Amino acid sequence: MYDVVVIGGGPAGLTAGLYAARGGLKTIVYESNVFGGQIVFSNEVENYPGFEKGISGMDIIDKFMKQAEKFSVELSYDGVSRIEDEGKIKKVYLNSNTCIITKTIIITAGASANKLGCPGEKKFLGKGVSYCATCDGAFFKNKVVAVVGGGDSAIQEALYLSNLAKKVYIIHRRDTLRAIKILRDRASSNDKIECVCNSIVKEIQGDQLVNGILIQNTQDGSKKRVDVDGVFIYVGTTPNSGFVSDIIKTDDSGYILTNEHMETNVSGIFAAGDIRVKSLRQVVTAASDGAVATESAQRYIEKIAI
């Protein structure tokens, strides 16, 4: 039996695992995809304290993992299909058809990139369509690309791509970008970046590979084709909470409801990081959530005394 099972290996999950193991609790962290979550796809993290020159998403997660392993956190690449609450005991069913018994669960499964849902998006995935500039940007050196979205992630990746591509279009449905001012200013002063506002992508076009996008103006409905070699999509995220939605309360968008102690509606089950309802989703707030969730889990374990 485990004291703590953490579901999700991003910043919240790795921090929760670190705090739990360091506190003497038998702990395992499950991650079905890649440890680190979405942050591993970021070329540079400038706002995490302690790294005045910035650090890549992969590098910061490497440090998270090494620190967790130092305190003997078990890390597993198995995924979780569902959980069950049996009072003082929780059951965690893995994709490998194994059932794990634990006293507490901390859900840190994060969120996944949203899709545009337009024709061509699925067809050209890996053939010009990408959700990760850090992963695929090198394939577009000296080519023309489009970044769809107007938030921090979209503009950060557009700036990264401008170091590789000869031209970067930012396609945004509103009249102004939503990113923070420092990123907006960098984009506007970059000669390689052109913002096409009040526009949405209606179709991603190509033959064997992407060769263009059809965009529509949201004001007058007019359409035009823009020749591009690649399309990078950053239009928000959806929480990965489907596997627990039968017992854990969420809001209408699927984000888990918690209190300030990261407690869900089920005693002994906690949630932390991007998967829960919160006002700011950043590495630093995810790590904070993970620490708080573990503290609450430890208090719960002491209370049930089994």
Image (cartoon, grey):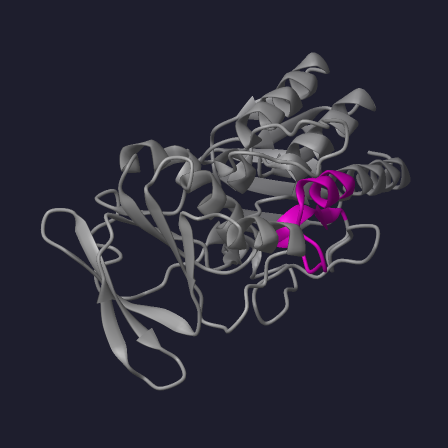
- Residue at 56% x, 33% y is 36
Q: What is the x, y in percent for residue 238? A: 51, 58
- Residue at 63% x, 64% y is 250
Q: What is the x, y in percent for residue 233? A: 39, 54
Tell me how many marks there are. Answer: 0
Residue furthest toward the bottom?
220
Residue 271 drawn above or below residue 200 = above
Residue 159 drawn above or below residue 57 = below
| Residue 278 lies in quadrant | bottom right
Q: Nearer the viewer, residue 42 or 271?
A: 42
Q: Nearer the viewer, residue 101 or 82?
A: 82
Q: Nearer the viewer, residue 104 or 85?
A: 104
Q: Is residue 67 magenta?
A: no
The span picked out in magenta is 268-288
Residue furthest toward the left?
207
On-image quarter of the C terminus: top right
On-image quarter of the N terminus: top right
- Residue at 58% x, 21% y is 62
Does residue 92 appear anywhere in the picture? yes
Q: Is residue 273 magenta?
A: yes
Q: What is the x, y in percent for residue 30? A: 55, 33
- Residue at 26% x, 42% y is 143
210 vs 198, left or right, is left
90 vs 165, left or right, is right
29 vs 287, left or right, is left
Residue furthest toward the top?
70
Q: What is the x, y in percent for residue 54? A: 65, 30
179 vs 194, left or right, is right
Does residue 3 appear anywhere in the picture? no
Residue 109 drawn above or below residue 236 = above
